Amino acid sequence: MRILYFLLKTTLSYSLRVFYPRMKFINSPKQPLGRTIYVSNHAASFMDPLVIAVLRMPIVFFMTRSDIFNKITQPFLWACHMLPIYRQLDGDDTKGKNEAVFDKCAKILSFGRNLLIFGEGFTDDTFIRRLKPVKKGAVRIGFTTLEKLNWKKDIYIAAVGVNYSDPNQMRSDVLISYSDKIRLNDYREAFEENPNKVINELTKKIEHLMQLQLTHIKDKEHAPFHEQIMMINRKGMNALNFDKKYSLKQRWEYSRKLANWFNEQNFEENKELAALEEESRNYFSLIKRFKIQEQYMFWKANDRNLSRSKEVMMMILLFPFAIIGAIHCAPAYILAKRFVQKTMKRKVFWGSMKVILGQLFIAIANIPLIFIFYYFIFPSWWLWIGYFFSIGLTGLAAYMWMVNFKRFKTKGVIAKTDTAKLLEKRMALEAKIKTLIPDFL
């Protein structure tokens, strides 16, 4: 394990657990080594390798798009266990360049390390709960390695599904599910007889296994409807609208089962379901026009007293810690946020880069304070190093204080707003969902 990889794995674990407080890992590997090719979906760009590599045991080398490698970045990316993968749009001789990379992959696997490959090859600009077609590269690398090793060592391949409630929403959820491993050596006879056939069949098998680890909606046109149902009934993987009595695993299972049910339906023939989708679309368009989020419509529909006491209590309890956190973290966080949003046009990169740069900027801004406190306040390195590492928690307190303050203000405005007709539409929509959509929990 290279030093920079180890440092990032250690430090980013703290930041990611702040960003995603609710995590779940299913069938996760327990060993750091294993000569396994993990093939994952690619729902959230840079965030995907972070949550897989940082939060779980296996030591992995990443296959990364080649256009981010240059003379300046290459040493850093190499130290982070990253290898380039060349696509057709990257210029001439991509096949020859990839062959050289595949040779490196074979050496990595031969020494007992693991590879992480994002089988889809790219990330959607808008987060959609689906799996795009999986490419053949991962399976091809596995068999290339076996041929170079003369089939003397076991090489495995496994599917990984990274499930976010919202990859860019701080304090949301992530669930990572692993399939059982497939031993590629078992396909030696069939591969030597017809390599292309075996590669195609195994790629399809891996794609199917990946779909089983994910919420996969075949027709992305119905993805908004799937999300809206989860928001209304509060049972699925939506980041802001969910019932806390359901575990993250239950919410994930509901989301998957609902998507699978969608995939079996014929929306053109099922007139009732098509009408429900249209009604749902109209309701959410309407509340968007009034600039009201569904979580507040649910609050107004179910809280007779329209109480804001929870927000008040949280602000009172968090206030002293929030002040400290704001002093230490707010300037660096704002700088990182503005830098990311100005320099990165695709929002899909924002969440991961805010985690990385936010941690870096906050650390750089506060390291001098350790020395200032030591020499001018109290000479104890242990005390001030402990205080330094507590800054992340006080920064979180500051963030949560602001979240509760915004909720308090928003609820106050909505309490005074006439939403009677909107609530009627919501009630009618909720009743039809209960009638037409199976209850998978």
Image (tube, helix red, strand yellow):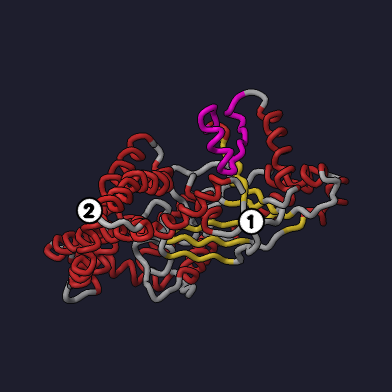
Residue farthest toward the left in the current orientation of the protein = 416
Q: Classify residue 310 by image quadrant.
A: bottom left
Distance from label 1 to label 2 (Cα)?
40 Å
* Residue 279 visible somewhere in the drawing: no
The residue identified by callout 1 is 159
* Residue 353 visible somewhere in the drawing: yes
Q: Is residue 40 left or right of residue 18?
A: right
The residue identified by callout 2 is 291
User: Which one is in front, 176 or 231?
Assistant: 176
- How many C-alpha atoms fall within 10 Å of the one at disc 1: few (<14), some, or many (≥20)? many
Tell me the amino acid under the disc marked 1. Ala
User: Which one is in front, 362 or 389?
Assistant: 389
Residue 158 within the segment the image draws in magenta: no
Residue 70 within the segment the image draws in magenta: yes
Percent x, y for residue 123? 50, 44
Percent x, y for residue 40? 59, 52
> Could you say whether the residue bearing mark 2 is in a helix, strand or loop?
loop
Percent x, y for residue 149? 82, 45
On screen, residue 70 above or below 204: above
On screen, residue 436 above or below 144: below
Tell me the amino acid under the disc marked 2. Lys
User: Where does the magenta region start and end?
Assistant: 68-91
- How many C-alpha atoms fall within 10 Å of the one at disc 2: few (<14), some, or many (≥20)? few
Residue farthest toward the top in the current orientation of the protein = 92
